[in-house]
Structures are given as structure tokens and as C-alpha cells.
Image: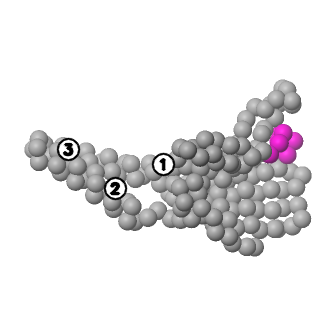
């Protein structure tokens, strides 16, 4: 087991941990830093200050209530659907590949791809702002036609999240 330091496309630190369970089973884990309390406070204060300015002009208390509600719902949606704590890639020799993502809210999503369904593993490229970024993808075969690709599964999306 070894830990290395890497950065995502925005320069934020990521850690990669890899484990060799046996000669047929390997696991790779990419972890992102936890949610920053300072960042949450800055966003919250910005929304509430804007809402207070609108309240000062309109004298409508519904503006303040809506700002609180929007902030709370936005934070809950962010930690439940967007903020990934860590992703795991478990490769089991002749069986397949399991891709798991653990979100900040505790929600987990797991996908298993059988080895017989995997056509290839490729390094794909995308243009982001003024740069070209590279990321790992699994090409999944179409069941009816094994020569064509039915799905492209990107791996380690924790560092691919767009701002």
C-alpha cells in the first residue's frame, strides 16, 4: 500500500492509494479533500447578504426565507449528488471491474462490469478551457454486436468535476 499526492484539473490535492490483495485482485482508491467549512460559510454569507440587500429595498420578508431555503437545499444537493469523497476501482482478474463512488452525504454508487463485456480500456481526452485533459475510460461492448461500443464509462470522476 502506498500513498501519493496528485492534483485535479483545478489544482486541488488528491490522494491515490493502491492495494494489491492478490495476484488477481487489485484496488485503486482516489480521495478528495473533505468539504471546506470556510467555502461553505463564504457561499452562505454571499447569498444571505444579497438577500438582505434585496430585503432592504423591497421590505419583503419572503426574500430572507427564500434565501435560507435556497442555501440549505443547495448545500444538501451539492453534498448528495456532486461532492465525491473517494472513488474505488477494484479489478478482479478474470471476473471484472467494480467502480464505486462515495459521496459526502454517505451515499454510495457501485457499478460492476463483467470482463466479457469490456472491449478495451482507453485514455480519452477532452478540451477544458484552454487545456487538453486526459482521463481513463472503459469501453463496454454492445451485446448484440461485439465489434461496436455500447457505453463509455469514465473512471475516477472525482477530479473531472467541472466548476
Q: Earlier in the sequence, mark 1 or mark 2?
A: 2
Magenta residues (range): 115-121
Residue 131 percent location from the top left of the image? 59, 46
Is 143 in front, or is 2? 2
- Mark 2 — residue? 43
- Mark 3 — residue? 63
Q: Earlier in the sequence, mark 1 or mark 3?
A: 3
Q: Please name which of the two marks, 1 or 2, marks the residue nearer to the observer.
A: 1
Give yes or no for residue 122 being in the magenta stretch.
no
Is 101 in front, or is 120? 120
Q: Is residue 61 above or below residue 23?
A: above
Q: From mark 1 to mark 3, how far is it between C-alphas?
A: 27 Å
Residue 142 percent location from the top left of the image? 80, 31
Q: Residue furthest front?
A: 130
Q: From mark 3 to mark 2, how far is it between C-alphas?
A: 17 Å
Q: Residue at x 28, y 51 (%)?
A: 47
- Mark 1 — residue? 163
Label 3 SS: helix
Q: In this view, does 75 lie above or below 13?
A: above
Label 1 SS: loop
Q: Residue at x 76, y 31 (%)?
A: 150
Q: In this view, does 146 lie above or below 22?
A: above
Q: Which residue is drawn at 32% across and 46% down?
A: 70
Amino acid at each position: 500500500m502506498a500513498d501519493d499526492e496528485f492534483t485535479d484539473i483545478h489544482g486541488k490535492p488528491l490522494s491515490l492509494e493502491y492495494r494489491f490483495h492478490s495476484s488477481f485482485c487489485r484496488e485503486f482508491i482516489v480521495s478528495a479533500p473533505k468539504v471546506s467549512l470556510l467555502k461553505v460559510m463564504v457561499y452562505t454569507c454571499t447569498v444571505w447578504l444579497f438577500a438582505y440587500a434585496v430585503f432592504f429595498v423591497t421590505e419583503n420578508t419572503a426574500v430572507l426565507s427564500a434565501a435560507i431555503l435556497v442555501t440549505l437545499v443547495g448545500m444538501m444537493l451539492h453534498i448528495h449528488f456532486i461532492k465525491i469523497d473517494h472513488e474505488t476501482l477494484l479489478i478482479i482478474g478474470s471476473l471484472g471491474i467494480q467502480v464505486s463512488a462515495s459521496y459526502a452525504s454517505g451515499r454510495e454508487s457501485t457499478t460492476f462490469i463483467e470482463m466479457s463485456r469490456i472491449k478495451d480500456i482507453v485514455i480519452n481526452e477532452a478540451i477544458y478551457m484552454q487545456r487538453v485533459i486526459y482521463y481513463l475510460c472503459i469501453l463496454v461492448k454492445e451485446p448484440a454486436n461485439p465489434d461496436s461500443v455500447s457505453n463509455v464509462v469514465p473512471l475516477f470522476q472525482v477530479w473531472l468535476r467541472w466548476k
